[in-house]
Amino acid sequence: MMNPQAVIKKSDIDAWITKLAGSRTVVAPVRKGAKNFAFAEVKNGKRICLKYIPTILPPKKYFMPQREMIQMFDRVKHQWQPAMETDGETVLLGVHTCDLSGIGFLNTVMDAEPRDVYYAKRRAKIVLIGIECNDYCDEFASCKVMNNHMPNGNYDLFFTELSDSYWVHIASPAGEKIVSETGFFAAAGKDHQKELDQVRAKKQQIFKDEVKVKHEALKGVFANSFESPVWDDLDKRCVACGNCTNVCPTCYCFDIRDELNLDLATGCRVRVWDGCQNEDFAKVAGGENFRKKRGQRQRHRYMRKFNYPVDKFKRYSCTGCGRCTRTCMAKISLKETINALAGETV
């Protein structure tokens, strides 16, 4: 493997992406309206925004689409067939460290038994190019307390902005292939390493714990807060819109539906995103609902981020991206909720 440290000039980014898009599907953050951003396919670097607040939907949508056909069936012939597979390699460019962490969590969950083969097939065809945030994206982020403000892997290439170039960490054969094929990269020198060290040192001053509790103590806060009155407060405020789970980079719940074509003989089986904030999510046969109140559903959502996954996977599933707070119609803040619970238990 070549030297894992390289650089690319900022002035070459457009030409590099143009060449990359000639042989692969390239997806990157682009502006949507005045303030929002979304991952979308690009053919060059002109539309790309590498300085952006987290996209409306996380890059999870390329690993686990909002609506995914998994089988086709024929009721007359009594036949089932797998859905057609996607072709070609997709490059996800400009993925924040918080979203890389979210993908890492999904990789762990989906690879656990029973293994999700549909996720695995999509993941095998995606190359991840991350980008470092040298400053906070906005006031909603809590990436420092979640230890996601610094690169923690889960990428093939990783870019850090320097003065006139990007420092690039090559982390996999797929990333090395892109570097060698496109021809826009050079070996990183001592001056580049010095500037990178300065960027990282400055970040230590910029990024501080955003809540009143340390990373390692978060689980204890939630484990001891099941009967907290904070959930009663959220019950009164939550409007059950489901935005928080729809935009979360680590929520992976889905529903399975069989859809008939107009001939009433053929159709397909699809899986679609579902979420624990929806009223019917915990309803079972007979009409019993185990989480009928909105406060109970909010509590479950927080426990699924800060308590339960630590027991099962030894890690939090909150990435600190801030999407749930940004999109909440009731202005429920993740950081305010954590601080309220921490005030009771710490």
Image (spheres, rainbow, N blue to C red):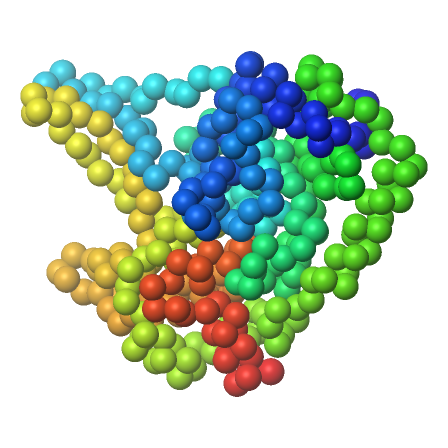
Q: Is residue 224 visible?
A: no
**x, y (%) of residue 42?**
50, 26
Nearest the viewer among 10 and 242 is 10
- Image height check: is 332 above or below 228? above
Nearest the viewer among 96 and 255 is 96
What residue is at 48 percent from the left and 67 percent from the top?
A: 334
What residue is at 29 percent from the left and 60 percent from the top?
A: 241
**x, y (%) of residue 294?**
29, 70
Quarter that holds the C terminus: bottom right
- Image height check: is 112 above or below 86? below
Q: Is residue 27 visible?
A: yes
What residue is at 84 percent from the left and 48 percent from the top?
A: 197
**x, y (%) of residue 304?**
45, 61
What residue is at 32 percent from the left and 22 percent from the top?
A: 83
- Image height check: is 240 above or below 37? below
Q: Is residue 307 left or right of residue 283?
A: right
Q: Quadrant of residue 190?
A: top right
Q: Quadrant of residue 285?
A: bottom left
Quarter that holds the N terminus: top right
Q: Is residue 40 left or right of residue 316?
A: left
The image shows a total of numbered marks equal to: 0
**x, y (%) of residue 255?**
28, 44
Q: Quadrant of residue 287?
A: bottom left
Nearest the viewer among 97 and 223 is 97
Q: Is residue 209 left or right of residue 298?
A: right
Q: Residue furthest left?
A: 263
